[in-house]
Amino acid sequence: QGARELLNTPAAGTAVRQYAGPASGSALPLGTTRIAYAASDACGNADTCAFEIVVKAAPAKLDLVCPGNATIRLATGQTSAVFTYATPTTSGTCPGGATLTRTAGPASGATVKEGVTTVAYRATDACGNSKTCSFTVTVVAPGPVTPATYCLAGAERPWTEWLERVEIGGVDNASSKCDTRCGYGDFTALKASVTAGATASLRVTPGLSWPGHRPELYLRVFVDWNADGDFEDAGEVVITERPGFAAFARTFPVPTGVVGGVRMRVTLKTGAYAEPCGTFDQGEVEDYTLVVGSGAQAFAGTGGGGAETTQRLIGAFGTATAPAQELSVRAFPNPTSVTLTVTSSASATSLRLYSLLGQQVYQQTLVPLVGAEAGSTVSTQLEVEQFARGVYLLSVEDASGQRKSVRVVLE
């Protein structure tokens, strides 16, 4: 870019002429420009002067920005994970742009093992500029998401408004106002499958105590993406909406660099948005587990009363395989303290009992009835005195991978 120089005009009565350089107000090129003047008057006096103007180019700028650090929590049975990240971005003023080179660490989409891996990049341009940046990916061993690491939350009076149904990633959970306790439901044993770098779809249906009830409900959903035991980091408030009193459906982005189980907290509060921790007056809070980046096999429980809910196995590419025949399961008496009778489809091949923390506490192999008519059932007696009192999820599975679960209470 050139520059313009404004020169002072000499006083009247003196003859001045410019004999070198551009006129005042001209655009000047990069480099040094010499400007010279001569002056004379009626008395025969004469003089000259000259000066130089140096125009320098502004230094070319170059900027390089890397993605932020990432943490991947391995799922059970994994020893490594695929790490996908955004390409670092460059910007600058040097003609011809910049050249980007990876100087350390894996390329995006490569497999990384447990531990800390550093990825580094360098950008250079034709003007001699050079910039570097780096970021890390930390791969941590599998570990359960336990309620003890999270703050308590819930409503004191869920009697007129509560979370009646939550649907996400293969989980379709119908619940009541008093699940783990009144005003809070711990459904972290239910594992919803979502994909890193994609969007997840969530549908929430509020429960209302009578048909004409029209409360002003506020929905806020949190996800602990980095699994550090809180919902306070950037991007961990994924939905903030006022659905009124109707069912509500929204999508939210799943960040890249997250793999494994993370906790989702769904809060429904009357009259205002809920914080992730603490209790409030009316509404309900429920916790779930999102399994990111893998089609984890999971089971879906229900909120109570022995009602059934189905979750089909999710394959490695997130597609569900339709069962050849509907699987069924019932458990009675429920609650029970000594013996539980489980009636399931004749095609069932296994029976499992899980705590609400997702821990398997019992497994039994079932022998399917070959040639049984559609709709045939078999009954199994389960002695439950050996188990701690509390709420469990009873799950049966058949050879096709179809799974069905029912919530049981041992008292």
Image (spheres, grey):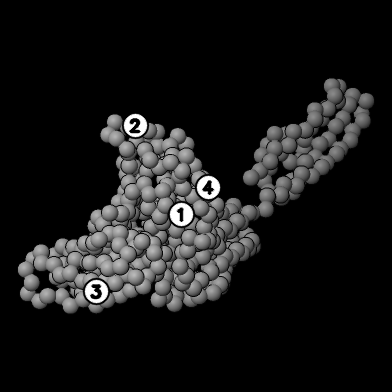
Q: Which mark is residue 214?
A: 2
Extreme residue toward the front, this view: 338
User: Which of pointers 2 and 1 lies earlier in the amino acid sequence?
Assistant: 2
- CA separation in Å, label 2 and label 4: 25 Å
User: Which of pointers 2 and 4 lies earlier in the amino acid sequence?
Assistant: 2
- CA separation in Å, label 4 and label 3: 40 Å
Q: Residue at x 33, y 48 (%)?
A: 176
User: Which of pointers 4 and 3 lies earlier in the amino acid sequence?
Assistant: 4
User: Which of pointers 3 and 2 lies earlier in the amino acid sequence?
Assistant: 2
Residue position for label 4? 278
Q: Nearer the viewer, residue 187 or 400?
A: 187
Q: Which mark is residue 223?
A: 1
Q: Nearer the viewer, residue 6 or 285?
A: 285
- CA separation in Å, label 4 and label 1: 16 Å
- CA separation in Å, label 3 and label 1: 33 Å
- CA separation in Å, label 2 and label 1: 28 Å
* Secondary structure of residue under mark 2: loop
Q: Residues within 10 Å of mark 4 (few under 14, many from 20)?
A: few
Dots 2, 1 in contact, CB < 8 A: no
